[in-house]
Image (cartoon, rainbow, N blue to C red):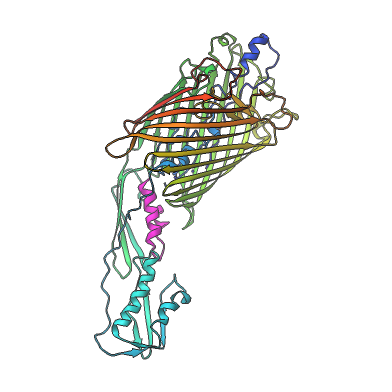
Amino acid sequence: MVAVLDLAPPPPLSSELPAHPLPAHIRSRLRPQVSFAQVGAGVGPEIAAPEQMPPEVDAIEPDAIELDAIEPDAIEMNTGGLPKPDERRFIPTALANQAVQTPIIQTPIIQPPPTAPVPGLPATNQTLILSDIQVVGSSIFQPQDLATIIAAFQNRLLQPNDLRELSDRITQLYLSRGYITSRALDPVILGDRATVQVIEGSIEAIEISGTQRLNPDYIRRRILLGAGQPLNTQRLEAQLKLLRGDPLFKSFEASLKAGSGLGQSILVVTVQEAKPVTAQVSADNALPPSVGGEQFGLQIQHQNLTGNGDRLGGSYGRSRTGGSQQYSVFYTTPVAIASQTLPSGTVSASAQVTRTRITQDDFETFGIRGTSEQYAITYRQPLIRTPQQELALSAGFTYQDGQTFLFEDRPTPFGLGPDADGVSRTSVFHLAQDYVKRDASGAWVLRSQVNFGTGLLGATENSDPVPDGQFISWLGQAQRVQRLGKRHLLLAQGSLQLTPDELLPSQQFSLGGGQSLRGYRQNARSGDNGFRFSLEDRITMLRNTAGDSTLQLAPFAEVGQVWNAGDNPNRLSDQRLLASLGLGMIWQPWPQVMLRLDYGLPLVGLRDRGENLQDKGLYFSTSYRF
């Protein structure tokens, strides 16, 4: 419906502050509020889609889950607004979207072509007994597969109609396995022996019309994955359904017509391309209050830049106070491989620049700011891609460079890990696997990623146990979407990060915020290890004339905990287990407009709780696509 670009958040100010002129009471208040893992950190736009994912999922950036249904192959930007600080802990949006979209199209896209007439048996009333029956031309069925059919016609008295029934039964065997253009001809009789010739169907040609900017080979390559010989229409249907869900197309129709010879067919494809450029404006309060809390953003994407299905997109975001500004750009392109069974892979590249500044009243005069740059490249290769499931492997590399300052231009490290100039760098290789399994009542989304922090490109190095850029960590994620009757959609989501190493804050697992654990401010708690579990029931209250849900209520329960590895000198609060109950509302009056409001009631009262909307458990997000 998903290559992985893991653009981790910029380096944060961690929980321990170095000696500097700030009074102690100010330093204590800074700890929970100015972590740059909290402050404006974020990841770039998601890039993905199976052919599609998502779903030709060409490249996937771990992203905050945005569960509004889209077509499985859509390659979407972050539909929840600007890049979020906690996106790294979530199943990629494109994968998550596959789990809640409408069920797979069950109506066949193609129908068998008219059967060409073939010579029949000569008119005769003569009976005969056959001692030997041979079936030739079958590459699918072995002699043992046909033995039962043949045995019913051997060594007994046969009428001419019996011989025709022999061919019909063999033809029916092909039809039952999805080979609807294959057939068995009437037997050729020679004495007491009969030979049945099988004509196995094939695609003689693919005729494509309606393309404008898109290269027809983009369609042809994907169809050929399901158009092997003999032609199996079930496999062909699967590829056509994936193409029908591709966001490159506004409409996609296909039909078979008889070809020039027995068993040969011509596939006729008619498409209407969707508009290539899409954009979105958004607003939410998903940033930490210390940099403004509320943010506004613009995202734009060209989903067919050169006519080969490659995407180029970018986004800009700014917090209400100007405390956070983010610029990101990405490019992803399909990569055809020399295989008749594997779908095309995808190469993706992205870059993001983040500038953050503490604008909270109590601390603005200290001129605390940070900068971060992130660059990533990823290759993703689906191994299985059907309308029902997708399995893919991906490998990528991400470089991140960040620095923090005090009094505007004084390089200052916050916490143990960054160097004396407040600089922290990571060069991380990622290996990931993702799997989507859809059924009539819901879907599973599973994802596993191993991160290897290296010393390449000047990555931060420290003596144990001080955190640095050399580490190994594992992130596992799971989601189940279950339809319960006509009104209820149950979402269960879980994430778990484990590592034996002390991590820089940009690599840590965080809790809190509207896209994470509601009821608490953004990134209220962070640690080397952590887990999060969320259960939400989306209850449809209103539908439009098409039957689509326009208003949903969403009661939820969430819990999570973080803890550090080894002897990490950056101490954690003793309040590391968070839990909440709450209620959300999702309103989508038109397909391109979405508004979400959430209220989370914290079950664990934090001693460092503030007075911001997030601290009061209130979250909003709204977006308009055009």
Observer-nearest residue: 51 or 284?
Answer: 284
Seen as rendered, the residue at the extreme left is 123
What's the residue at 49%, 41% (across, down)? 59
What's the residue at 58%, 35% (across, down)? 398
Q: Is residue 272 above or below residue 322?
A: below
Observer-nearest residue: 621 or 326?
Answer: 621
Placement of the C terminus among the 4 image quadrants: top left
Q: Is residue 203 visible?
A: yes
Horizontal and vertical percent position of residue 592: 34, 32
Horizontal and vertical percent position of residue 479: 51, 41
- Residue 240 lies within the magenta run: yes
Q: Main secondary structure of the magenta part?
A: helix
Q: Is residue 297 visible?
A: no
Q: Magenta residues, as a range?
A: 221-245
Quarter-of-image position of residue 228: bottom left
314 with respect to 265 (left or right): right
Horizontal and vertical percent position of residue 616: 50, 19
Observer-nearest residue: 224 or 113?
Answer: 113
Q: Is residue 590 above or below residue 362?
A: below
Quarter-of-image position of residue 179: bottom left
134 with respect to 359 (left or right): left
| Number of numbered labels in the structure image | 0
Horizontal and vertical percent position of residue 396: 57, 41
Placement of the N terminus among the 4 image quadrants: top left
Observer-nearest residue: 132 or 214?
Answer: 132
- Residue 210 lies within the magenta run: no
